[in-house]
Amino acid sequence: MPIEPEELVSLRDALLRARATGTRSVDYDGKRVTYATDAEMATALADLERRINASTRPRPGAVRFTTSKGV
């Protein structure tokens, strides 16, 4: 089951808050994730941003092809 965009945003916000305060652990849904380095946190943030952008981007509608025999 895919994660809803709202949940991704709340996860990103929690990670940003933890990173800004120098905390290496983030708690969510009764789980705790501890990051060893700031680089790991930056990678996780980049992944969350990518997922948020992908989930909120409108999907293309119909694709219409036009062909010709060149005549």
Image (cartoon, rainbow, N blue to C red):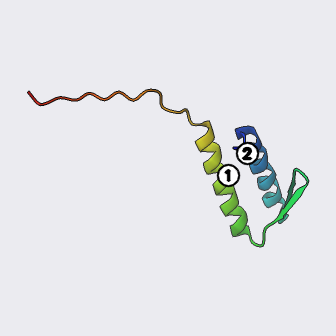
Report helix, strand or loop for mark 1.
helix
**Residue at image location 69% in from the left, 59% down from the top:** 44
- Residue nearest the observer in this picture, 51 or 40: 51
For disc 2, the marked residue is 8
Q: CA distance from mark 1 to mark 2?
A: 7 Å
Q: Is residue 11 above or below residue 23?
A: above
Left or right, residue 55 beside residue 7: left
Pointer 2: residues within 10 angstroms few (<14), some, or many (20+)?
some
What's the residue type where badge 2 is placed? Leu
Mark 1 near mark 2, Cβ–Cβ under 8 Å?
yes
Residue reaching furthest left? 71
Residue 28 or residue 3, whichever sits in front: 3
Amino acid bearing label 1: Leu
Q: Residues within 10 Å of mark 1 (few under 14, many from 20)?
A: some
**Position of 18 relative to 49 (above/below):** below
Question: In the rendered image, which quarter contains the N terminus?
Answer: top right
**Residue at 67% across / 51% down in the picture?**
48
Could you tell me residue 67's position as x and y percent? 22, 29
Residue under the point 84% across and 60% down:
21
Q: Quadrant of residue 33?
A: bottom right
Residue 46 x %, y %: 64, 56
**Looking at the picture, how far across and down is residue 2, in whole percent?**
69, 44
Residue located 43% across and 27% down the image: 62
Q: Name the element at disc 2.
A: helix
What numbered label is drawn on residue 48?
Answer: 1
- How many dots with numbers? 2
N-term mark: 1 or 2: 2
